[in-house]
Image (tube, rainbow, N blue to C red):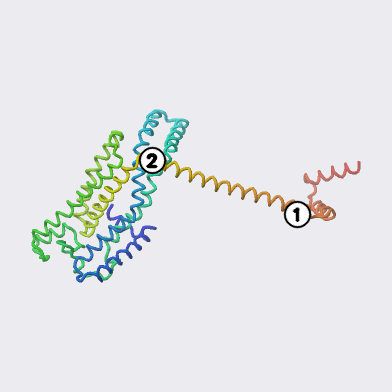
């Protein structure tokens, strides 16, 4: 999974975002290089500033997504009641009726079934684009020096914690005591797992609704609380320390943001949130109605103009021109055709 994220620089859209974020990283590094008197630690500080900046830019989308999550905690019990009502009904009519009733619930609260997915879909390309810039930072910041790759007690941001421990065992000297290198190699993955766990727990508190979840969903969330931090520990231990620093800093930033978001949303009652959603949905319906009316007006105008132009072209012909056209059409009638027979009947009636 992580290797596919690292190769995301070759993906459509994500690759373009990587290019932009790479320019941001290069700007941060260049700025720090001109400000600080030493190259030591430039890569680490650049990663920290870069992570804070990107997650701050994504904060409005995060707030919107968390607001939808809070609303979803109110909607879920009603949706689950409808699903339970149609649990054993699999015919098409019942399924359509169930979908209609669920849609009515979302309409009542002024939101949509896809409301919680859209912010995540917008954020995903940016999140995917973060990894290649950190992992292949040398490609985006070409003038990095060896001294710049040192950060605090990390001797090199391009090697993995496991490689650090192996190097110490083989007697390699990184300029720090062996115990410091081993502690650093162990502490970085542990910090990553701990901060990831706190971040997940804080994000779940916004719904405040372990009681409103069904047993299956609650079990899934508990499993994620354990597996995600453990996965983080494993990946940070086996990836370059630059990725580890990014994971720790990003989790800390998310924790701080989540605390602020939780306080902000706790002051907002569900009733106020519903009212705002209804007003927003009404504005959207009004805009859609205006667009539909304009399209209908344009369609009617086009139809009228076509008819009027056809009438004008027909009325502009003189009687003589009309007779000439009819005569030319009569000459082109094939013998034995239905039109020829109709012409014969017409002449017979005229002679009569």
Which one is earlier in the sequence, the residue at label 2 or at label 1?
Answer: 2
Residue in view at x 72 percent, y 53 percent: 309
Point out the frontmost of discs 2 and 1: 2
Per the rendering, the mark at residue 313 is: 1
State left or right for residue 273 relative to residue 255. Answer: right
Residue in view at x 10 percent, y 64 percent: 176
Horizontal and vertical percent for residue 128?
32, 55
- Please state, as top left, top right, bottom left or bottom right, where the C terminus lies in the image: top right
Q: Quadrant of residue 2?
A: bottom left
What residue is pinned by disc 2?
272
Q: Secondary structure at mark 1?
A: helix
Residue in view at x 33 percent, y 45 percent: 66
Q: Secondary structure at mark 2?
A: helix
How packed mark 1 is, by other alpha carbons closer than 10 Å (few <14, some 14-19, many 20 or more), is: few
Q: Nearer the viewer, residue 298 or 331?
A: 298
Q: Quadrant of residue 72?
A: top left
Horizontal and vertical percent for residue 245?
22, 57
State left or right for residue 32 relative to residue 99. Answer: left
Horizontal and vertical percent for residue 313?
75, 54
State left or right for residue 286 relative to residue 146. Answer: right
Q: Residue furthest right?
A: 352
How packed mark 2 is, by other alpha carbons closer than 10 Å (few <14, some 14-19, many 20 or more), is: few
In three-dimensional space, the C-alpha distance between marks 2 and 1, rounded to whole angstroms, equals: 61 Å
Horizontal and vertical percent for residue 6?
29, 57
Check contact, mark 2 vs mark 1: CB within 8 A. no
Q: Nearer the viewer, residue 283 or 312?
A: 283
| Vertical arrangement, residue 60 with respect to residue 269, above or below | below
Q: Nearer the viewer, residue 330 or 135?
A: 135
């Amino acid at each position: 999974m992580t290797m596919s994220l690292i190769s995301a620089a070759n993906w459509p859209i994500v690759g373009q975002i990587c290019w932009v974020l790479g320019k941001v990283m290069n700007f941060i590094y260049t700025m720090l290089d001109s400000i600080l008197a030493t190259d030591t630690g430039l890569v680490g500080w650049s990663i920290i500033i870069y992570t804070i900046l990107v997650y701050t830019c994504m904060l409005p989308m995060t707030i919107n997504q968390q607001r939808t999550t809070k609303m979803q905690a109110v909607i879920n019990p009603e949706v689950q009641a409808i699903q339970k009502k149609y649990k054993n009904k699999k015919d098409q009519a019942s399924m359509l009726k169930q979908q209609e009733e669920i849609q009515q619930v979302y309409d009542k609260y002024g939101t949509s079934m896809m409301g919680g997915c859209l912010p995540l879909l917008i954020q995903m390309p940016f999140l995917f684009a973060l990894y290649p810039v950190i992992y292949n930072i040398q490609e985006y910041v070409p003038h990095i020096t060896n001294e710049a790759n040192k950060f605090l007690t990390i001797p090199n941001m391009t090697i993995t914690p496991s490689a650090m421990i192996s190097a110490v065992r083989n007697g390699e000297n990184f300029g720090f005591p062996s115990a410091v290198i081993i502690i650093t190699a162990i502490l970085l993955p542990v910090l990553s797992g701990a901060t990831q766990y706190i971040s997940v727990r804080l994000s779940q508190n916004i719904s405040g609704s372990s009681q409103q979840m069904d047993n299956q969903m609650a079990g899934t969330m508990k499993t994620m609380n354990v597996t995600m931090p453990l996965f983080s520990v494993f990946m940070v231990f086996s990836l370059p320390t630059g990725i580890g620093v990014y994971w720790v800093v990003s989790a800390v930033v998310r924790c701080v943001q989540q605390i602020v978001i939780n306080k902000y949303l706790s002051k907002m009652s569900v009733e106020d949130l519903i009212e705002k959603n209804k007003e927003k949905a009404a504005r959207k319906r009004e805009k859609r109605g205006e667009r539909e009316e304009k399209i209908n007006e344009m369609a009617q105008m086009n139809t009228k103009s076509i008819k009027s132009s056809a009438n004008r072209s027909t009325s502009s012909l003189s009687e003589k021109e009309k007779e000439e056209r009819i005569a030319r059409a009569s000459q082109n009638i094939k013998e034995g055709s239905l039109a020829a027979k109709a012409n014969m009947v017409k002449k017979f009636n005229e002679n009569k």
